[in-house]
Amino acid sequence: MKNPWQELPKPLIYLAPMSGVTNTAYRQIMKQFGSDLLFPEFVSIDGLHHGSIKSTELLTYDDCERPIIAQLFGADPALFYEAALRVEAMGFDGIDINFGCPAPKVANNGGGCALLADLGRCRAVIEAVIAAVGGRLPISIKTRVSYKAVHVRDFCTVIADLPIDNITIHGRPFEKPYEGAANLDCIKEAKTLVPFLVIASGNGHTPEAAKYTLEYTGADGIALARGTFGKPWLAQQIKQYLATGQYTQPSLPDILVTMMAHVTLTMALPSTRPFVEIRKVLGWYIRDIPNAAHYRAQLVRVSTVEEIETIVAKIQAELNLDFSLPASSQ
């Protein structure tokens, strides 16, 4: 697939990159439930430049995850040029530029949404990536409604003539990145300002919200993030709802079987701390089951797969659930 942004059916429904979350295991579970695209955790161009092992490891992926796009963050156009060439050599299906991350460790160093403070630099960053891989890899960008006094419409005006395939816009500002209702008007407006695809982010946590967002904004897709915590089937549900007006809710056994499949994938990661990776994920999966707090208190302390299986067996017995785990997770 040469350009997934153009070749995949619309609307696109996919998992956005999230720091500390979208590792290989998370991505592959989301792929099983219909995510159209996948992204590793976003990676520092400075880390790549300085030979950071962690940065390189974050870009490890399996071919079953295609189409997969690397998202880069930083502030130096020259290092973006260098990183784009490196990502191309690693076989990624596209490059995404992060103009939206509000995390202090990113924004305080001039990257992420802090780049919006200098729209000339924003354009220079994109032009550097185009100079490196333009015509060979599709280039996309992610941003948010505003950074301090700079609105996304200003950003769109500055970059509208560049050969970009997609802009993803999160409808919450830098100052309140996860609070309050997402601003959908800015996404709707962006559709009138740029000739490339516009993806909505920030109001796709349920199938109903995703459908409303698409209809209201005219966006070309939905980027999913925190709404997938413990609900990797969200993309599948959204597609069902858009097609039929209905969607399937997983049963408690389905949830626990998927959770254990996630455990199996996590244990296969080249990590020295797999249980640090999985404990928070376990809590997400069981948060809506009866007596969730009781089970979560046990799951956040696990240090072996056998301990997880014992807790799952206890849930199964106490809730009188009839199911069997796949052999691969036992």
Image (cartoon, grey):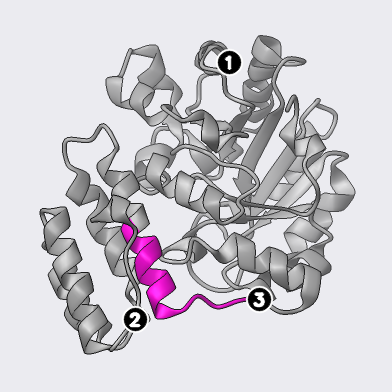
Depth check: give the residue in front, 320 or 232: 320
Which circle, 2 or 3, is nearer the viewer? 2
Q: Tally the numbered discs.
A: 3
Which quadrant is the C terminus positioned in?
bottom left
Where on the picture, by quarter, is residue 269?
top left
User: Is 207 rendered above or below residue 48?
Assistant: below
Amino acid bearing label 3? Tyr
Which circle, 1 or 3, is nearer the viewer? 3
Which x, y percent locates residue 112? Answer: 50, 39
Amino acid bearing label 1? Glu
Mark 2 highlights which residue? 322
Mark 1 highlights which residue? 88
Decide if residue 160 is on the left or right side of residue 27.
right
Q: Secondary structure at mark 3?
A: loop
Amino acid bearing label 2? Asp
Residue at screen point 68% across, 34% down = 140
Which x, y percent locates residue 170? Answer: 61, 55
Among numbered discs 2 and 1, the one appearing first in the sequence: 1
Mark 3 highlights which residue? 247
Q: Residues within 10 Å of mark 2 (few under 14, many from 20)?
A: few
Where on the picture, by quarter, is residue 23?
top left
Q: Which residues are magenta?
A: 248-260
Residue at screen point 72% across, 73% down = 241
Q: Secondary structure at mark 2?
A: loop
Residue at screen point 74% across, 39% down = 166
Among numbered discs 1 and 3, the one appearing first in the sequence: 1
Q: Secondary structure at mark 1?
A: helix
Query: Main structural element of the magenta stretch: helix, strand or loop?
Result: helix
